[in-house]
Amino acid sequence: MLSHLRLGVNIDHVATIRNARGGDHPDPVRAARIAEEAGADGITAHLREDRRHIRDADIELLVKGIKCPLNLEMAATEEMLEIALRHRPHAVCLVPERREERTTEGGLDVCGGHNHLTPIVRELARAGIRVSMFIEATEPQIEASRSIGAQVVELHTGAFCEAHADGHIALRNDILERLRQGARYGHSLGLEMHAGHGLNYETVGVVAGIPELAELNIGHFLVGEAIFSGLENSIRRMRTLMDDARGRTGLAKT
């Protein structure tokens, strides 16, 4: 259905390594430029409230220093809204955030947060910023995302990847089917469908084969794999696996 499945490369954990030692190395902007050269269609960066990896200065430098679109992941707070409106990235993905979590552990509750989220989405859209909701693949959350004005939905693939890693095949297949149904349903509502979280070389193929998906966002695995093979090589291999998955399922057509 879609001729090209976009790859968004998340550079958060380049900043994590930098911050562990202090200073400016390794540079997330340099990593973003390498990702562009290696075939990334976009760069994703999550500016957390606690600034544990990406910092405010990184966002400013990314806006000025990269050619491909910047997707700013952020919590739905007034502070983050002000930052997004000041820098005006190509897109904003609203995500849940808790200080004690190691990484984003689940999807945003758009149904429960409707009244809080709606004005934030409206302000971002008014500024010409594409708005995405990072959610679980359920029809109520997808419907709520559309109702508050989001143009994009990103389905959380973390539980699928965890079930795969733990060898829980039945659970893995059940979650995969929910992702497929969610992508189909969101697409039928006119939403652009993305997916991401926890994807690696083993799990990316079946997710990439979901025809309604337009983009995958992948970061931690690529940065970790870069230790062994280099960032450019890790991204190029991921890009190849995504393209192969589309080819195998007969989706390389407009």
Image: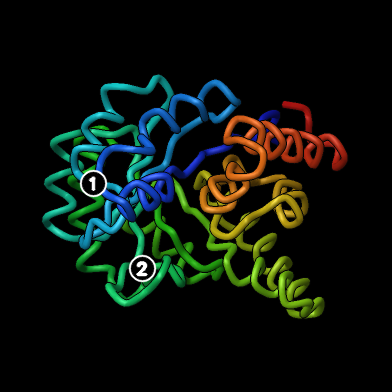
Q: For residue 138, what is the image quadrant? A: bottom right
Residue ID at (51%, 68%)? 136
Amino acid type at mark 1: Arg
Q: Which residue is mark 1?
A: 55
Q: CA distance from mark 1 to mark 2?
A: 26 Å
Considering only order in the chain, which callout, 2 or 1, is on the residue closer to the N terminus?
A: 1
Secondary structure under tag 1 reads: loop
Indicate the quadrant containing the N terminus: top left, top right, bottom left or bottom right: top right
Q: Position of residue 211 (x, y in %)?
A: 72, 45
Q: Is residue 241 left or right of residue 38?
A: right
* In-front residue for pair 231/193: 231
Badge 2 crowding class, 10 Å Cα cut-off, few under 14, some 14 to 19, many 20 or more, is many
Please tell me which residue is depicted at 81% across the width and 36% down the height of the picture: 244
Left or right position of 168 against 200:
right
- Find disc 2 in the rendering and name its residue: 110
Using the rendered view, name the quadrant where residue 99 is placed.
Answer: bottom left
Q: Is residue 108 above or below residue 11?
A: below
Identify the residue shown where x is 85% and y is 42%. Answer: 249
Q: How is the image coloured?
A: rainbow
> In the shown orientation, is residue 185 left or right of residue 172?
left
**Residue drawn at (40%, 56%) of the image:** 133
Q: Amino acid at mark 2?
A: Val
Place of residue 54 in the rendered image (x, y in percent of width and height, measured from the top left)? 30, 48
Of residues 203 and 146, the one drawn nearer to the viewer in this rendering: 203
Nearest the viewer among 63 and 207 is 63
Residue 2 shows which numbered tag? none
Which secondary structure lies at badge 2? Answer: loop
Q: Nearer the viewer, mark 1 or mark 2?
A: 1
